[in-house]
């Protein structure tokens, strides 16, 4: 019976996935002056594809803030092979790089051949053939973007990753909440949980296979862990009071969380296997929003023990917590960059709430966004972008900003509120 | 022990959750679900399958008692405050009286905040407001066993606007019987 139910659930998941959900669409709000001009020639045979690979690659690279793809109208010629390229043409266009290629349909499989060329060095940097089924075309395009990005910048591309986020529609007793997962460009979104009660704080396990989150579906908050491939899930905690802000340790064995079972929200760490619980903080204040340092030796968290919310760092070695943010009266929900030498957070000034970055060696804080309702920063696994929730008119939408603030884009949703984005780790 | 493995019911719960998701977008599959989920009612959300609540007896029969639950069930707070405003003391006293007269009735104090600030931090602020109400009730002589606190933070706004009028409606504690 249980097996049958699971099978039925799997079938329904598939059905849901197949339904037309409104997709998030990207809108570049700020381009960087430093963006590298790159010409992406539409692949020969590419306009017959259900998904246009060249366009997806161009959008990926543009969204990163590091590249400025030339408009298609400005392309002088449309070579599909490096042998046919006249480098002078592209030098005249001031394009530093050039991508050419072609797609062939072979017995239902697509054979995508692409090359990356250095225009000034007149050199072929990369050439590869990717075989893709019809359903994998978007994934293949993101893969190609990853290869180009890494070849030029030396930084691993994060286009083949996902984001989880929460949506809500309605007011008060009539709100519908849903937890969704989409590609990093907002496409292919899939609802993995829906409820009449709040869903909060999705957090990816380091291997990208599970999501921890808070759901109020029993009438009170509890932390759940859901396996994304099977849909199977467990209720990990349901203590009295707040069960909030789950955060995976880098080894995936523990979850830090905020529990108020002893009166005030405090930071705890639970061993996911044994469910042993260790309390880290002891204050009369709100201690919440824990996040592990990438090396696993410390955690940061938000506390208002000083009178207003600030970020503290708890060292697991000496079990001491020290305040690390001092600029402004409201700093919360810190997230580390992958190197662990900077944090991104929410900061408040006279205009509202923004995403800021603080370098931990200098303690210098830089405000990255000029929008005023920004929260829930989540860092791309390669550290180049931060996705966050913001407002557009009266709706919650997702925005992203480069790690230095030089480039930003929006992923507006056609309906309802979108918030609490969580960028997945690398998925392979 | 408060930890309850969820495993025994997960398949049903997930079926329901998925069904709820489907019905909001398509909604013609109710019939096909009935046979597999075993619980029938479609789109009722996944809460029903869990039964996690303890000691929260449904008190329908008590509703017919001589004094009804006080009608005013929401009190409001100032920005960033959890202090009870004097104009709401009479509301709290009415609930205190009701709860003392009905020692078998439980109430959930739902704490809410406006949208400003981060979500998890606001859960803490909402809880503080509900705790302030709990403390008031307990000083009035209400048994703590009748009171449960659930903070929703900013997750269940009563008003969606981004203005002080909406914020003021959202900074609240609701008595939920």
Image (cartoon, coloured by chain):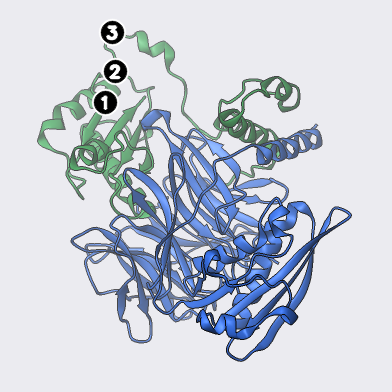
Q: Residue at x 42, y 48 (%)?
A: A242
Rendered residue at 60%/73% (across/down): A157
Residue A413 point in image, percent of width and height: 46, 46
Instruction: Say which of A264 and A333 sits in front.
Output: A333
Tags 3 and 2 on a common chain: yes
Q: Which residue is mark 3?
A: B66
User: Cα distance, mark 3 to mark 1?
Assistant: 18 Å
Decide if residue B146 is on the left or right side of residue A164. left
As drawn, the label of residue A132 is none
Q: Which residue is mark 1?
A: B73
In front: B60, or A1?
Answer: A1
Spatial separation of the CA atoms under disc 1 and disc 2 = 9 Å
Residues at marks 1 and 2 on the same chain: yes
Q: Which of the 4 image quadrants contains residue A370?
A: bottom left
User: Which residue is label 2 attached to?
Assistant: B69
Q: Are marks 1 and 2 in contact (CB under 8 Å)?
A: yes
- For the N terminus of chain A, give its image quadrant: top right
**Which mark sits nearer the N-terminus, 3 or 1?**
3
> Would you say B139 lies left or right of A148 here?
left
Which of the chains is blue?
A
User: How far from the left and from the top, in percent, is residue B37?
Assistant: 71, 27
| Labels 3 & 2 near each other (Cβ < 8 A) | no
Residue A281 picture quarter: bottom left
In the image, farthest residue toward the right: A107
């Amino acid at each position: 019976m249980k097996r049958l139910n699971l099978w039925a659930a799997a079938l329904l998941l598939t059905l849901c996935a197949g339904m037309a959900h409104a997709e998030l669409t990207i809108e570049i709000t700020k381009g960087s002056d430093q963006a590298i001009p790159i010409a992406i020639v539409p692949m020969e045979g590419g306009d017959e594809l259900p998904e246009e690979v060249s366009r997806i690659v161009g959008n990926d690279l543009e969204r990163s803030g590091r590249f400025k793809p030339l408009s298609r109208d400005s392309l002088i010629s449309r070579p599909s092979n490096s042998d046919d390229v006249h480098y002078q043409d592209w030098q005249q266009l001031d394009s530093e790089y050039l991508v050419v290629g072609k797609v062939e349909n072979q017995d239902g499989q697509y054979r995508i051949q692409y090359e990356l060329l250095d225009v000034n060095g007149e050199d072929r940097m990369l050439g590869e053939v990717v075989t893709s089924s019809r359903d994998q075309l978007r994934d293949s395009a993101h893969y190609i973007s990853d290869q180009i990005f890494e070849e030029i910048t030396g930084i691993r591309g994060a286009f083949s990753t996902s984001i989880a986020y929460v949506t809500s529609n309605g007011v008060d007793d009539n709100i519908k909440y849903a937890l969704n997962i989409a590609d990093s460009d907002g496409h292919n979104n899939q609802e993995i949980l829906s409820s009449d009660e709040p869903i909060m704080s999705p957090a990816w396990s380091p291997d990208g296979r599970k999501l921890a989150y808070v759901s109020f579906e029993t009438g009170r908050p509890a932390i759940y862990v859901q396996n994304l491939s099977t849909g199977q899930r467990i209720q990990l905690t349901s203590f009295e009071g707040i069960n909030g802000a789950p955060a995976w340790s880098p080894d995936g064995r523990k979850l830090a969380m905020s529990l108020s079972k002893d009166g005030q929200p405090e930071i705890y760490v639970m061993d996911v296997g044994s469910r042993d619980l260790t309390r880290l903080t002891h204050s009369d204040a709100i201690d919440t929003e824990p996040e592990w340092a990438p090396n696993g030796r410390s955690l940061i968290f938000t506390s208002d023990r000083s009178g207003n919310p600030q970020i503290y760092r708890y060292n697991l070695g000496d079990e001491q917590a020290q305040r690390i943010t001092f600029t402004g009266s409201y700093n919360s929900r810190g997230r580390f960059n992958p190197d662990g030498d900077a944090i991104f957070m929410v900061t408040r000034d006279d205009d509202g709430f923004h995403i800021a970055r603080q370098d931990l060696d200098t303690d210098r804080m830089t405000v990255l966004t000029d929008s005023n309702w920004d929260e829930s920063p989540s860092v791309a696994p390669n550290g180049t972008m931060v996705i966050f929730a913001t407002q557009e008119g009266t709706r919650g939408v997702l925005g992203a900003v480069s790690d230095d603030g030089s480039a930003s884009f929006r992923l507006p949703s056609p309906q309802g509120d979108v918030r609490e984005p969580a960028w997945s780790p690398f998925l392979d | 022990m408060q930890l309850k493995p969820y495993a025994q019911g997960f398949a049903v719960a997930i079926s329901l959750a998925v069904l709820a998701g489907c019905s909001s977008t398509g909604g013609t599959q109710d019939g096909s679900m009935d046979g597999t989920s075993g619980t029938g009612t479609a789109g009722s959300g996944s809460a029903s399958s869990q039964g996690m609540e303890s000691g929260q007896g449904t008190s329908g029969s008590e509703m017919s008692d001589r004094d009804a639950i006080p009608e005013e069930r929401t009190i409001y707070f100032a920005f960033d405050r959890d202090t009870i405003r004097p104009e709401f003391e009479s509301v709290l006293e009415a609930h205190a009286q009701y709860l003392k007269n009905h020692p078998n009735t439980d109430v959930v104090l739902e704490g809410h905040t406006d949208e400003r600030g981060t979500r998890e931090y606001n859960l803490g602020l909402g809880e503080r407001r509900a705790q302030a109400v709990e403390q008031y009730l307990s000083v009035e002589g209400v048994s703590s066993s009748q009171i449960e606190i659930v903070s929703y933070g900013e997750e269940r706004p009563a008003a969606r606007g981004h203005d002080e009028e909406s914020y003021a409606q959202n900074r609240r504690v609701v008595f939920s019987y």
